[in-house]
Amino acid sequence: MAIPHILYISPGLLKRSRGKYLSRSDLQQLALNRTCFIGAHGLTHRNLRDCNSVEMRHEILTSKLMLEDLISREIKSFSFPYGAATYAAIQVLQESGFTSAVTSRTGVIHSESNPFLLNRTEIAPGEEDCLFNLKIKGAFDWHHLRQYDLNEIQRQLMSDSTETAYLQQWL
């Protein structure tokens, strides 16, 4: 099953060869996948709250331009490094042609959500299959869970015993 996803990349951290980070050629290969979208994550993953206005604009705009040049596709989404969203950064994003940005907050996205302060669910490298399955079923959407009876949510989510055991750690 192909699940659409966005990889947020700090192009200043890309390596020319394989190692801890993706290489430029790795990213170009990923960008060929029709379900993989690339978003910007700042040039060097610097906390934008620590930047003055010139540095912030450089981190945001240079990351967008470098990624667009590298993969030959427009970059429209941004992920705030460390989840550090500011109104000044949102203004720079809007002026730079971005259409959305995500924070590090988990939760649902509604039609009323600010497109530059979107919640997200992070899927980390090496996560266990059962954790991944729980995430795509909404088990880590704490805002959503608070609104409903936890027993009913748990009943709906639990399709196998591995997921049940894993979720018990969190409830």
Image (cartoon, rainbow, N blue to C red):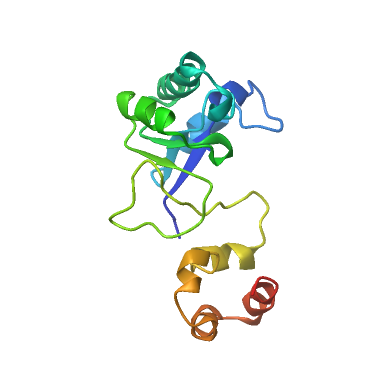
**In which quadrant of the rendered view does residue 132 lie?**
bottom right
Viewer-side residue, 156 vs 125: 156
On the question of residue 7 being in view, the answer is yes
* Quadrant housing the N terminus: bottom left
Viewer-side residue, 14 vs 156: 156
Viewer-side residue, 78 vs 91: 91
Answer above or below: position of 132 versus 57.
below
Where is residue 114 drawn, in percent x and y? 33, 46
Residue most extreme to the left: 111
Tell me which residue sits at (60%, 81%) in the image.
160
**In which quadrant of the rendered view does residue 169 lie?**
bottom right
Tell me which residue sits at (41%, 44%) in the image.
117
- Asked if residue 108 lies left or right of residue 171, the reply is left
Where is residue 155 drawn, in percent x and y? 53, 85
On the question of residue 73 being in view, the answer is no
Answer above or below: position of 109 versus 159.
above
- Asked if residue 171 lies left or right of residue 96, the reply is right
Count of number-bearing discs:
0
Tell me which residue sits at (49%, 29%) in the image.
28
Where is residue 45 drawn, in percent x and y? 59, 29
- Asked if residue 146 lies left or right of residue 98, the reply is right
Where is residue 3 drawn, in percent x and y? 44, 55
Answer above or below: position of 33 versus 22.
below
Residue most extreme to the top: 54
* Quadrant housing the C terminus: bottom right
